[in-house]
C-alpha cells in the first residue's frame, strides 16, 4: 500500500531525511517512531504531497503522489499534530464540509457521518459546537472525519499527544475497529511507546534522518535484548535529550537562504 525507496529530503545543505526505504502492507498498522527532529514529520509531508522529495520514490496504492496529487489525496486521510477543526461549527458540520470537499455523495456522507460519530461516541453531541468539546473529543472527531471519505490509508501524526490514558485507550480501540473492519492501512507516529507496542503490527525507527531498525515490536525487543519497546527504542537511538528546535532552526535558515537566491 505504501512503498518508499531511497527517499531523500534536503533543505539546502541540511539532510532531514537520508536515503530511507520501507514498505507498508494493506490493512497494516505501521508505527514510524523516532526522537524529536528525527525526520518523521518531514517524511509524512512527502508521503502526503505537502513536500517534494529531493530524490527517491514514493508510491501510495500504486500512485506517485507527486505526479498524481489529486488521485493520491483521494486515497488517504490525515490527522496532523495541530488541530484543524472549525471550532465555531458543530461536529456534524465539520463532517459535512469534509465530505463535500472530498466529493462524497450526499446520501453516503450522511450515512458515514452517523456511522463514524456513533463509533467514536460523538453522535449525541453532533449538533454541539466543537469549541465545547474536550481535547479527547476533538481528537476523536478529527480521526472520525479522516475516515469519512473511506480512505485506503490514514496518516496519524501524534494523534494522542496530550490526551489522558483513558482517552488514548478509547481512541485506539476505535481506530483498530475501523482498521480491522474496513482494512484501512494506518501509518502513525507517536512518542508513547506503550501504545505503539500495543497497536502496531510493524515498526520503523528513524534517527538523524536514517532508519535504524524495522520489525514487529517483538522483533525489535529481541534484537536489542530489551524487555519493553521503550527499552528497545532507547537502545537504538540513545538516551540523550533531543532539541527539536535545533533541526527546525537549521531548516529555517536553509529556507531563508533559498528564498534570498
Image: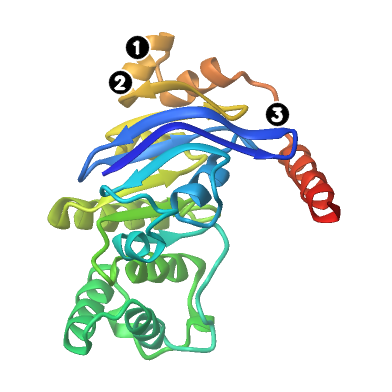
User: Pointer 1: what residue?
Assistant: 222
Position above or below: 33 against 1:
above
Left or right side of 132 for 252:
right
User: Pointer 2: what residue?
Assistant: 218
Please tell me which residue lies in front, 127 or 13: 13
Could you say which quadrant of the image residue 259 lies in?
A: bottom right
Image marks 3 and 1: residues in contact by CB distance under 8 Å:
no
Please tell me which residue lies in front, 212 or 238: 212
Mark 3: few/some/many CA within 10 Å (<14, 14-19, 20+): few
Q: Locate residue 54, reporting x and y percent.
A: 58, 40
Instruction: Residue at the far left: name it.
Output: 181
Cα gap from disc 3 to disc 1, whole angstroms = 24 Å
Left or right side of 126 for 111:
left
Could you say which quadrant of the image residue 181 lies in?
A: bottom left
Cα gap from disc 2 to disc 3, whole angstroms = 25 Å
Cα gap from disc 2 to disc 1, whole angstroms = 6 Å
Q: Residue at x 32, y 80 (%)?
A: 99
Q: Residue at x 39, y 71 (%)?
A: 141
Q: Earlier in the sequence, mark 2 or mark 3?
A: 2
Mark 3, secondary structure of its residue: loop
Position above or below: 174 against 145:
above
Position above or below: 220 against 128:
above
Mark 1: few/some/many CA within 10 Å (<14, 14-19, 20+): some
Left or right side of 227 for 18:
right
Mark 2, secondary structure of its residue: helix
Q: Locate residue 37, reporting x and y percent.
A: 65, 37
Mark 2: few/some/many CA within 10 Å (<14, 14-19, 20+): some
User: Pointer 3: what residue?
Assistant: 241
Image marks 2 and 1: residues in contact by CB distance under 8 Å:
yes
Residue 84 - label? none
Mark 1, secondary structure of its residue: helix
Q: Locate residue 80, reporting x and y percent.
A: 51, 59
Amino acid at each position: 500500500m505504501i512503498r518508499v525507496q531511497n527517499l531523500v529530503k534536503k533543505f539546502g545543505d541540511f539532510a532531514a531525511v537520508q536515503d530511507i526505504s520501507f514498505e507498508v502492507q494493506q490493512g497494516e498498522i505501521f508505527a514510524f517512531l523516532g526522537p524529536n527532529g528525527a525526520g518523521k514529520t518531514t517524511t509524512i509531508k512527502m508521503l502526503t504531497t505537502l513536500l517534494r522529495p529531493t530524490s527517491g520514490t514514493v508510491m501510495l496504492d500504486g500512485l506517485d503522489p507527486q505526479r498524481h496529487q489529486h488521485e493520491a489525496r483521494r486515497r488517504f486521510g490525515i490527522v496532523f499534530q495541530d488541530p484543524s477543526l472549525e471550532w465555531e461549527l458543530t461536529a456534524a458540520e465539520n463532517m459535512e464540509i469534509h465530505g463535500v470537499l472530498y466529493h462524497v455523495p450526499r446520501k453516503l456522507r450522511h450515512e458515514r457521518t452517523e456511522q463514524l460519530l456513533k463509533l467514536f461516541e460523538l453522535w449525541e453531541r453532533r449538533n454541539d459546537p466543537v469549541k465545547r468539546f474536550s481535547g479527547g473529543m476533538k481528537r476523536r472527531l478529527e480521526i472520525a472525519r479522516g475516515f469519512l471519505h473511506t480512505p485506503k490509508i490514514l496518516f496519524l501524526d501524534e494523534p494522542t499527544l496530550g490526551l489522558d490514558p483513558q482517552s488514548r485507550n478509547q481512541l485506539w480501540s476505535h481506530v483498530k475497529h475501523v482498521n480491522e473492519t474496513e482494512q484501512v492501512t494506518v501509518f502513525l507516529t507517536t512518542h508513547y511507546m506503550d501504545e505503539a507496542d500495543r497497536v502496531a503490527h510493524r515498526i520503523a525507527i528513524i534517527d538523524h534522518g536514517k532508519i535504524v531498525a524495522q520489525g514487529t515490536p517483538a522483533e525489535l525487543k529481541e534484537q536489542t535484548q530489551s524487555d519493553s519497546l521503550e527499552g528497545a527504542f532507547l537502545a537504538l537511538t540513545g538516551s540523550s535529550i533531543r532539541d527539536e528546535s535545533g533541526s527546525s532552526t537549521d531548516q529555517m535558515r536553509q529556507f531563508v537562504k533559498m528564498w534570498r537566491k
